[in-house]
Image: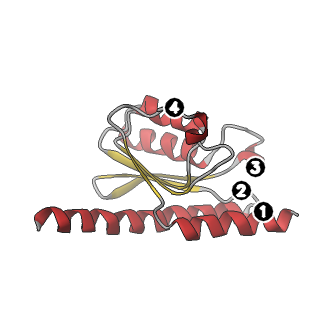
Amino acid sequence: MFEQNDSKNIAEQDKKFMRMAIDEARKALVEQEVPIGAVVVCGGRVIGRGHNLVETLCDATAHAEMQSITAAATTLGGKYLKGCTLYVTVEPCVMCAGALAWSQIDRVVYGAPDSKRGYTTVGGRIFHPKTEVVAGVLQEECETLMKDFFKTLR
Protein backbone atom coordinates (compact mmCIF):
# COMPACT_ATOMS: atom_id res chain seq x y z
CA MET A 1 0.00 0.00 0.00
CA PHE A 2 2.78 2.45 0.89
CA GLU A 3 4.53 1.89 -2.45
CA GLN A 4 1.30 2.44 -4.37
CA ASN A 5 0.69 5.79 -2.67
CA ASP A 6 4.32 6.73 -3.18
CA SER A 7 4.18 6.03 -6.93
CA LYS A 8 0.86 7.89 -7.16
CA ASN A 9 2.44 10.92 -5.47
CA ILE A 10 5.42 10.78 -7.83
CA ALA A 11 3.08 10.63 -10.86
CA GLU A 12 1.13 13.65 -9.58
CA GLN A 13 4.35 15.54 -8.92
CA ASP A 14 5.58 14.69 -12.43
CA LYS A 15 2.39 16.17 -13.90
CA LYS A 16 2.68 19.30 -11.77
CA PHE A 17 6.22 20.03 -12.91
CA MET A 18 5.51 19.04 -16.52
CA ARG A 19 2.81 21.72 -16.53
CA MET A 20 5.52 24.21 -15.57
CA ALA A 21 7.64 22.95 -18.47
CA ILE A 22 4.61 23.43 -20.75
CA ASP A 23 4.35 27.03 -19.49
CA GLU A 24 7.99 27.49 -20.52
CA ALA A 25 7.18 26.00 -23.95
CA ARG A 26 4.42 28.58 -24.34
CA LYS A 27 6.98 31.32 -23.69
CA ALA A 28 9.02 29.93 -26.59
CA LEU A 29 5.90 29.96 -28.75
CA VAL A 30 5.33 33.66 -28.02
CA GLU A 31 8.91 34.31 -29.14
CA GLN A 32 8.29 32.30 -32.34
CA GLU A 33 10.65 29.57 -31.19
CA VAL A 34 9.97 25.84 -31.39
CA PRO A 35 7.76 25.37 -28.30
CA ILE A 36 9.89 23.24 -26.02
CA GLY A 37 10.17 24.04 -22.34
CA ALA A 38 12.09 22.57 -19.43
CA VAL A 39 12.42 22.87 -15.67
CA VAL A 40 14.92 21.32 -13.27
CA VAL A 41 13.59 20.41 -9.84
CA CYS A 42 15.55 19.59 -6.70
CA GLY A 43 13.94 18.85 -3.36
CA GLY A 44 10.51 19.79 -4.68
CA ARG A 45 11.72 23.23 -5.77
CA VAL A 46 12.33 24.56 -9.31
CA ILE A 47 16.00 25.54 -9.50
CA GLY A 48 16.29 26.05 -13.25
CA ARG A 49 13.97 26.74 -16.13
CA GLY A 50 14.29 27.45 -19.79
CA HIS A 51 12.74 27.34 -23.21
CA ASN A 52 14.13 27.19 -26.71
CA LEU A 53 16.07 30.31 -27.65
CA VAL A 54 17.76 28.98 -30.79
CA GLU A 55 16.38 31.66 -33.12
CA THR A 56 16.55 34.50 -30.61
CA LEU A 57 20.21 33.87 -29.75
CA CYS A 58 21.21 32.56 -33.21
CA ASP A 59 22.67 29.59 -31.33
CA ALA A 60 21.99 25.98 -32.32
CA THR A 61 22.80 24.87 -28.76
CA ALA A 62 20.24 27.14 -27.04
CA HIS A 63 17.77 24.32 -26.42
CA ALA A 64 15.35 24.39 -23.48
CA GLU A 65 17.27 21.64 -21.69
CA MET A 66 20.59 23.47 -22.03
CA GLN A 67 19.06 26.69 -20.69
CA SER A 68 17.57 24.90 -17.67
CA ILE A 69 20.73 22.88 -16.96
CA THR A 70 22.82 26.06 -16.90
CA ALA A 71 20.32 27.83 -14.63
CA ALA A 72 20.17 24.85 -12.25
CA ALA A 73 23.95 24.49 -12.08
CA THR A 74 24.22 28.21 -11.32
CA THR A 75 21.62 27.90 -8.55
CA LEU A 76 23.41 24.92 -7.01
CA GLY A 77 26.88 26.37 -7.50
CA GLY A 78 28.22 23.24 -9.21
CA LYS A 79 28.07 21.25 -12.43
CA TYR A 80 26.43 18.09 -11.08
CA LEU A 81 22.65 17.80 -10.79
CA LYS A 82 22.54 14.79 -8.48
CA GLY A 83 19.21 14.59 -6.69
CA CYS A 84 17.53 16.59 -9.46
CA THR A 85 14.87 15.87 -12.09
CA LEU A 86 14.57 17.50 -15.51
CA TYR A 87 11.06 17.91 -16.91
CA VAL A 88 10.99 18.64 -20.63
CA THR A 89 8.07 18.75 -23.02
CA VAL A 90 9.81 16.85 -25.84
CA GLU A 91 12.29 13.96 -25.77
CA PRO A 92 15.83 15.37 -25.56
CA CYS A 93 18.06 15.32 -28.63
CA VAL A 94 21.45 13.61 -28.54
CA MET A 95 23.23 16.87 -27.63
CA CYS A 96 20.95 17.54 -24.66
CA ALA A 97 21.01 13.91 -23.56
CA GLY A 98 24.82 14.08 -23.55
CA ALA A 99 24.77 17.25 -21.46
CA LEU A 100 22.34 15.60 -19.05
CA ALA A 101 24.63 12.58 -18.81
CA TRP A 102 27.57 14.81 -17.94
CA SER A 103 25.45 16.56 -15.30
CA GLN A 104 24.69 13.18 -13.67
CA ILE A 105 21.04 14.14 -13.24
CA ASP A 106 18.94 11.54 -11.38
CA ARG A 107 15.76 11.63 -13.48
CA VAL A 108 14.62 12.84 -16.89
CA VAL A 109 10.87 13.12 -17.45
CA TYR A 110 9.62 14.04 -20.91
CA GLY A 111 6.25 14.48 -22.55
CA ALA A 112 6.26 13.84 -26.29
CA PRO A 113 8.62 11.52 -28.16
CA ASP A 114 10.68 12.95 -31.04
CA SER A 115 10.92 10.32 -33.75
CA LYS A 116 13.19 12.50 -35.93
CA ARG A 117 15.75 13.95 -33.54
CA GLY A 118 15.17 12.35 -30.13
CA TYR A 119 18.02 10.55 -28.41
CA THR A 120 16.23 7.19 -28.73
CA THR A 121 16.52 7.39 -32.53
CA VAL A 122 20.25 6.71 -32.27
CA GLY A 123 19.44 3.55 -30.36
CA GLY A 124 21.99 3.87 -27.60
CA ARG A 125 21.89 4.61 -23.90
CA ILE A 126 23.24 8.12 -23.51
CA PHE A 127 22.25 9.12 -20.01
CA HIS A 128 24.25 8.32 -16.90
CA PRO A 129 23.62 4.62 -16.05
CA LYS A 130 21.78 5.55 -12.84
CA THR A 131 19.48 8.10 -14.54
CA GLU A 132 15.82 7.10 -14.50
CA VAL A 133 13.88 8.09 -17.64
CA VAL A 134 10.11 8.53 -17.64
CA ALA A 135 8.36 9.15 -20.98
CA GLY A 136 4.85 10.22 -21.91
CA VAL A 137 3.92 12.56 -19.04
CA LEU A 138 1.16 14.85 -20.39
CA GLN A 139 2.18 13.62 -23.82
CA GLU A 140 -0.94 14.80 -25.63
CA GLU A 141 -0.57 18.41 -24.43
CA CYS A 142 3.10 18.44 -25.37
CA GLU A 143 2.43 16.98 -28.82
CA THR A 144 -0.39 19.45 -29.47
CA LEU A 145 1.93 22.41 -28.84
CA MET A 146 4.42 21.07 -31.37
CA LYS A 147 1.84 20.11 -34.01
CA ASP A 148 0.07 23.46 -33.80
CA PHE A 149 3.37 25.33 -34.10
CA PHE A 150 4.47 23.45 -37.21
CA LYS A 151 1.00 23.82 -38.81
CA THR A 152 1.43 27.61 -38.69
CA LEU A 153 4.73 27.34 -40.59
CA ARG A 154 3.22 25.45 -43.51
Quadrant of res 67: top right
Residue at the spot of label 2: 34
Q: Earlier in the sequence, mark 3 or mark 4?
A: 3
The span from disc 2 to disc 3 (Cα, nearest Å) is: 11 Å
The one nearer the camera, 113 or 77, is: 113
Provide residue 90's location: percent of width, then percent of height: 58, 54
Residues at marks 3 and 4, CA–CA distance in whole angstroms: 31 Å
Cα separation, mark 1 vs mark 2, equals 8 Å
Instruction: Determine which residue is flagged by label 4.
Output: 124
The secondary element bearing badge 3 is classed as helix
**Element assignment for label 4:** loop
The mark lying in front, picked from 2 and 4, is: 4
Which of the labelled discs sits on residue 56, or is there none? 3
Q: Amino acid at mark 4?
A: Gly
The reply to whether the C-beta atoms of the residues labelled 1 and 2 are less than 8 Å apart is no
Q: Which one is closest to the eye, mark 3 or mark 4?
A: 4
What is the CA distance from the residue labelled 2 to the residue labelled 4? Answer: 25 Å
Instruction: Please report the residue visible at 32 percent of the width from the left and 38 percent of the height from the top.
Output: 82
The first of marks 3 and 1 along the sequence is 3
Mark seen at residue 150: 1
Judge by depth and name the residue closer to the eye, 6 or 80. 6
Of labels 2 and 3, earlier in sequence is: 2
For marks 4 and 1, the one nearer the N-term is 4
Q: Which amino acid does the dot numbered 3 rest on? A: Thr
Task: Name the residue: 65% across, 51% down.
Answer: 52
Q: Amino acid at mark 2?
A: Val
Residue 83, image x, y percentages: 29, 43
Q: Are marks 3 and 4 in contact (CB under 8 Å)?
A: no
Disc number lying in front (4 or 1): 4
Comparing labels 2 and 3, the label whose residue is closer to the camera: 2
Residue type for callout 1: Phe
Q: Nearer the viewer, mark 1 or mark 2?
A: 1
